[in-house]
Image: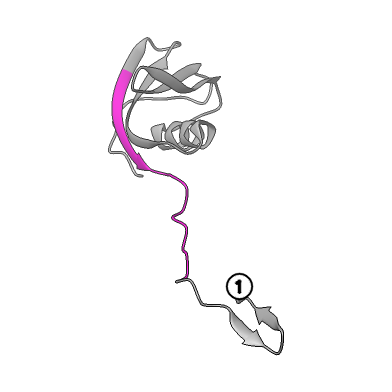
Amino acid sequence: MKTNSNTPMSATDKIVAQLESNGRVLARVSVSNITSIDEIIGMVRALAGKFMGLAQLTIRNQTQGWSRVIALASRRCAAPTYSRPASRPAMQGRQYLIPF
């Protein structure tokens, strides 16, 4: 995700970010050596793990004194499982062969 941001950020700034969905905190970080909002979004999404739906990312630059709220949507959920149609067991001699 590429954000169009003119928010100034330096590598020495202390950044606090929190990702929240449905009133539940999914991830919270406090870092420095970050130079872009895209890096923060990637880091927080990786920490949050799999979630589905809308979330609110609050980013606060404690050094410069600004904050920003970004709405994020995610479809990161478990991959759908595929099930084959059930096959009927076949009789071979006196044994059943059950296909898997």
Instruction: Write the residue at 56% across / 27% down.
Output: 33
- Residue 35 pos. (x, y %): 47, 31
Q: How many numbered circles does the render carry?
A: 1
Q: Secondary structure at mark 1?
A: loop
Give the camera-side residue of 37 and 9: 37
In what quadrant of the picture does the C terminus appear? bottom right
Give the camera-side residue of 70 and 85: 85
Task: Indicate left or right for 43 with 20 as reference.
Answer: right
- Residue 96 pos. (x, y %): 66, 79
Task: Give the residue type that dot 1 points to.
Answer: Phe
Image quarter for residue 3? top left
Above or below for 88 versus 7: below
Instruction: Write the residue at 46% across / 53% down.
Output: 79
Magenta residues span 68-84
Above or below for 85 versus 1: below
Magenta stretch: includes residue 89? no
Q: Residues within 10 Å of mark 1 (few under 14, many from 20)?
A: few
